[in-house]
Image (cartoon, rainbow, N blue to C red):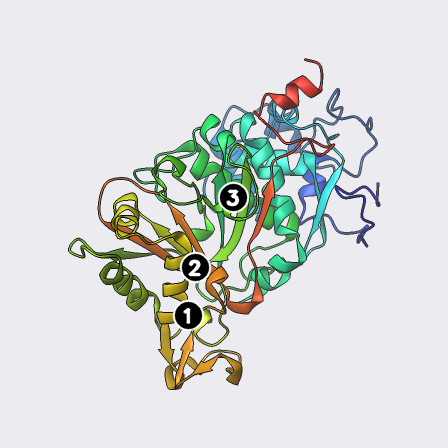
Amino acid sequence: MGNKHLNNKKVKINENACGCLIDDLIGENQDSDKNKNKELINNRLCGSHENDLEVYIDPEIEKVSYDFYMRKLTDGLPIIPPTKEKLLKFLNYTDYNSDDIITILPPKQGKATVEKIAINSIMAGCIPAFMPVIQHAVQALSQDQFNLPGVNATTHPVAICVILNGPISREIAVNSGVGCLGPGNIANATIGRALRLCLINIAGAVPGIGDHATMGSPAKYSFCFGEAENENPWKPLHVERGFNLENSTVTVMAAEAPHNVNDHRSKTAEDLLNTIVNTAAVAGCNNSHVPGEILVIMGPEHAQTVENDGWEKEDVKRYIHENTLVPVELADRGGRKLDEQWMVNGNVRITRSPEDVILVVAGGPGRHTMIAHGFGTSSQSVTLPLTLKDGTLLQSVQDYKKSKNY
């Protein structure tokens, strides 16, 4: 089991690591059939506690939730008890075995098995059809360029932003319109939350232990939305990154909580973009002393204003890159000394190139844009296509059931 991995890549695994007690939760250390998709013989919550059987039969969900909370296995919000019956439903939406390791998550070097990912998704309140998105998002986090160890360990309030593109995003009803960054949609709320619970319970990113953010961020509860591709006058993010429009993808980015840009008066692209760059050009963000990615979530009305002026997406990204400037004397106050290569005539650009401007379109009516600074040079966003185990691109979440001959 130690060498099972999504990409057949041998990974050094700490065999004693339990993923912050989650191994005990699902009975990984007890003998069971290899194919747990067919039969899960362990009904106990934790083999080290004689009275934990009540978790699966006690009707008091509040008691179950509080028990998990006291053991530092939640984000502080109530959870759904991960029963065997619920787990089997989630395993119907993956073509991996339940004990297959998708990846290893630092700092705990926890084994992100399919089963653990499903359990955390249940706890978050997901429905089974969300499983493919969460599984691929966890895989994306483990890519070297994302630098999950740094994202988890930093004192910076950086969160994990999940951006969904393609037909599967629409199939599972991810919100890309009105209120897409707020409450009210089960997919947005629980997919982002499931990823955070995986980080807590598998990666060990418990606040004050594996997660050292000085103040944290509300974006760490859940930060997930879809791109409004039908409202986008330009190429959507996944197409910009080399995928076809009909492909479904998940993008993860280390980002701060979003900040609003309110501009109801600008009639030209340049005037509107000047409002955006002056909102983004702030001292104190990581980008000001270690330039890197910035997320620009442009509302459809703002995007239309810019496009009506004849600006292409590349023009917008270039303008934001070249004009979002912070004076050197303010920029050079971060935790890392400012490198002279980023200085331009006494200023610092907060991005290294136009490619660092992650521009997407989302939201409803209203002349607003949201910006979220990234983690500087310390993390690079990752986009992965949703596929079956053999690499076949998913057309629908129901493809998993077809692959099992259901």
Mark nearer the N terminus (1 vs 3): 3
Q: Nearer the viewer, residue 111 or 241?
A: 241
Are discs 1 and 3 less than 8 Å apart at CB?
no
Check if mark 2's residue and mark 3's residue have beta carbons within 8 Å. no
Closer-to-camera residue (192/230): 230
Disc 1 residue crowd, few under 14, some 14–19, many 20+, Cα 10 Å: many
3D distance between C-alphas at marks 1 and 3: 27 Å
Give the residue displayed 54% in from the left and 49% down from the top: 252
Label 3, residues with CA under 10 Å away: few <14, some 14-19, many ≥20: many
Element at label 2:
loop
Mark 1 vs mark 3: in front: 3
Residue 323 pos. (x, y %): 35, 70
Instruction: Write the residue at 66% across / 17% down.
Output: 402
Residue 256: numbered disc: 2
- Residue 153 in view, yes or no: yes
Residue type beneath disc 2: Glu
From the image, state whether disc 2 or disc 3 is nearer to you: 3
